[in-house]
Image: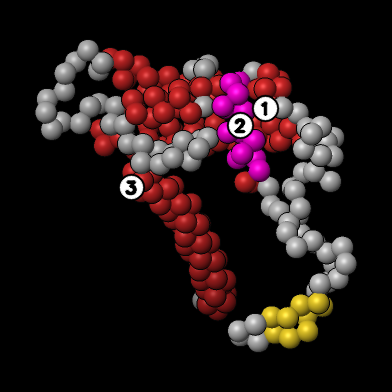
C-alpha cells in the first residue's frame, strides 16, 4: 500500500500532462479550422475576387468567367491543371445555359447554390492565378524599365506585350499594377528641421535633395 501510495502522484501527473497536451492539440486544431471558416464567410459575403484587377462581388460562376476572359484572358486561356476547378465551373454554366431558370430561383452556378468545399476550391484557384499575375507584373516591369536611364530609352508597351504574348492593353495593365506594387524611392539625406510644431514645419532644404519622389525604376 505504501508503494501504491507513492505511485499515485506519478500516475496523476501523467494523466494531467496527457490531458493538457490533448487540450493543447484541440485548441490548436480549433485555431486551424477557424481560419478557413473565417475565409469562407468572407468569400460568401464579398464574392470571388478577380486575380488581376482585384474586382470583388463576383457571386455567379458565369459572371466570374466572363470577367476573367475579358480582364485577364492569358491566365485562363488553358483551363487545365491549375484551372481544373474553373473548367468544372464552366461546364456547370454550360449545362445550365440552355435551361431557363424559374424566376426568383438562383442558377446552379451561383455561389449560394454551391457547396462550401467547391466555393473554397474556386477561391484557392483564383489565389494561385493571382500569384501568377504578380509574376507577370514583375516580368513586365523588368521588360519595361530594366537597363533604361530615361523615359526615351525604355521599352515600349508594344515590345512588352510581344515578349509576354499578351495584348497591349493587358501589358499596360500589368505594368500599371507592377508600378503600384513597388514603393517609391525614399531619399536617405537627413532633413534640417529649423522649427516644428502642431501647425507649421520649417525645413532648410539642402542642395541636391529632391522635393518630389524620383521614378521607381529610372536611375
* Mark number displayed over residue 45: 3
The answer to whether residue 31 is left or right of residue 145 is left
Q: Closest to the observer: 187 or 209?
A: 209
- In the image, the segment drawn in magenta is 166-179
Q: Name the residue located 16 percent from the left edge and 23 percent from the top edge.
A: 101
Residues marked 1 and 2 touching at CB (< 8 Å): yes
Task: Identify the element where label 1 is drawn.
Answer: helix
Distance of mark 1 from mark 2, alpha carbons? 6 Å
Q: Earlier in the sequence, mark 1 or mark 2?
A: 1
- In the picture of the structure, the residue carrying the numbered disc 2 is 172
Residue 28 x, y percent position in the rendering = 50, 57
**In the image, residue 102 above or below residue 201:** above
- In the picture of the structure, the residue carrying the numbered disc 1 is 157
Q: Tell me if I can see residue 8 in this picture.
A: yes
**In the image, residue 10 lies in the stretch drawn in magenta:** no
Q: Which residue ends up furthest to the right in the rendered image?
A: 207
Amino acid at each position: 500500500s505504501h508503494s501504491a501510495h507513492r505511485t499515485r502522484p506519478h500516475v496523476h501527473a501523467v494523466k494531467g500532462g496527457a490531458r493538457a497536451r490533448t487540450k493543447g492539440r484541440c485548441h490548436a486544431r480549433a485555431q486551424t479550422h477557424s481560419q478557413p471558416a473565417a475565409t469562407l464567410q468572407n468569400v460568401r459575403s464579398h464574392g470571388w475576387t478577380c486575380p488581376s484587377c482585384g474586382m470583388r462581388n463576383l457571386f455567379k460562376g458565369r459572371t466570374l468567367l466572363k470577367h476573367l476572359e475579358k480582364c485577364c484572358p492569358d491566365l485562363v486561356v488553358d483551363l487545365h491543371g491549375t484551372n481544373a476547378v474553373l473548367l468544372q465551373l464552366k461546364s456547370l454554366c454550360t449545362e445550365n445555359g440552355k435551361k431557363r431558370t424559374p424566376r426568383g430561383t438562383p442558377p446552379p452556378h451561383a455561389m449560394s447554390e454551391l457547396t462550401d468545399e467547391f466555393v473554397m476550391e474556386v477561391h484557392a484557384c483564383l489565389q494561385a492565378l493571382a500569384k501568377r499575375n504578380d509574376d507577370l507584373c514583375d516580368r513586365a516591369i523588368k521588360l519595361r524599365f530594366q537597363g533604361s536611364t530615361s523615359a526615351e530609352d525604355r521599352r515600349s508597351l508594344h515590345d512588352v506585350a510581344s515578349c509576354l504574348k499578351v495584348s497591349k492593353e493587358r501589358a499596360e495593365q500589368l505594368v500599371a499594377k507592377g508600378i503600384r506594387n513597388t514603393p517609391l524611392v525614399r531619399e536617405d539625406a537627413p532633413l534640417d528641421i529649423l522649427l516644428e510644431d502642431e501647425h507649421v514645419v520649417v525645413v532648410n532644404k539642402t542642395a541636391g535633395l529632391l522635393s518630389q519622389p524620383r521614378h521607381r525604376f529610372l536611375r
